[in-house]
Image: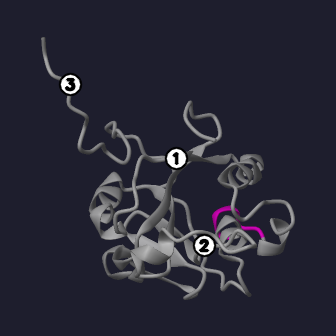
Amino acid sequence: MATFTSDANTPVWPAEDGEHYFRDLVIHPIRQKGPTCVSTCLAMLTGKRPEDFQGNINTQDPVSWSAALKPYGMKLAYCPHDARKMKFYIEELIALDDLFALSFYTTPDSEDILADPNSDGFVTQSHFILLHRDKIYDSNRYRCEPARTHRCVDYHTKRIFRVLPVTHARGL
């Protein structure tokens, strides 16, 4: 009888040749005002204003983000990941050569990430950005920069999503 062993790793996305959906999307950086990285990134994806999403999404609920993208022909799909630093995913994501939404914790201290929440439910700050091909669009920095040198690579991953057409079988 064979002994079961669990898998040590999985691809972020099981790549299929030619599976590119938004490689040609033109993204225009928008500077966020206040703690609005999610609504600002949704605005960058759709060509709308951040205010068009504020009040219509829950900033801690990716299902609401995906629902907000559907009228624009997009949705989000979770990608398998854990809390390792983004630098352990970035090359694989770049190789997929498409559009992703990434979230990372902005503390370098893993103990802060694993801490119990305060009385309001807050644990630690995180940030939401877009990866398009090999470039990061960061609403906090109001620019596009090479993914390999963006500060996210040194921080722990919170979430990874692939941006998909609304008709794709996977997604939220």
Q: Which image quarter holds the C terminus?
A: top right
Residue with the mark numbered 2: 123
Residue at x 33%, y 40% (from the top left corner): 15
Instruction: Tell me if label 2 and label 3 are in contact, CB under 8 Å.
Output: no
Residue at x 37%, y 56% (from the top left corner): 97
Q: Position of residue 44 (x, y in %)?
A: 65, 70
10 Å crowding of disc 2: few (<14), some (14-19), many (20+): some
Q: Where is residue 65 in the image (x, y as percent from the top left)?
A: 70, 55
**Real-space Cα separation, disc 2 to disc 3, in angstroms:** 36 Å
Above or below for 3 versus 55: above
Q: Determine the residue located farthest toward the top in the rendered image.
A: 1
Instruction: Classify residue 140 as left or right of residue 97.
Output: right
* Magenta part of the chain: 44-48
Residue with the mark numbered 3: 4
Q: Where is residue 124 in the image (x, y as percent from the top left)?
A: 58, 76
- Quarter of the image for residue 123 reads bottom right
User: What predominant SS class does the magenta segment belong to?
Assistant: helix
Q: What residue type is labelled 2?
A: Val
* Total numbered badges shown on the rendered structure: 3
- Looking at marks 1 and 3 on the same chain, the residue that comes earlier in the sequence is marked by 3
Residue at x 64%, y 47% (from the top left corner): 75
Above or below for 102 versus 35: above
- Looking at marks 2 and 3 on the same chain, the residue that comes earlier in the sequence is marked by 3
Residue with the mark numbered 1: 78
Does dot 1 land on a helix, a strand or a loop? strand
**Real-space Cα separation, disc 1 to disc 3, in angstroms:** 27 Å
Above or below for 141 versus 14: below
Instruction: Classify residue 38 as left or right of residue 98.
Output: right
- Quarter of the image for residue 151 reads bottom left
Instruction: Classify residue 57 as left or right of residue 144.
Output: right
Q: Does the magenta stretch include residue 47?
A: yes
Q: What residue type is labelled 3?
A: Phe
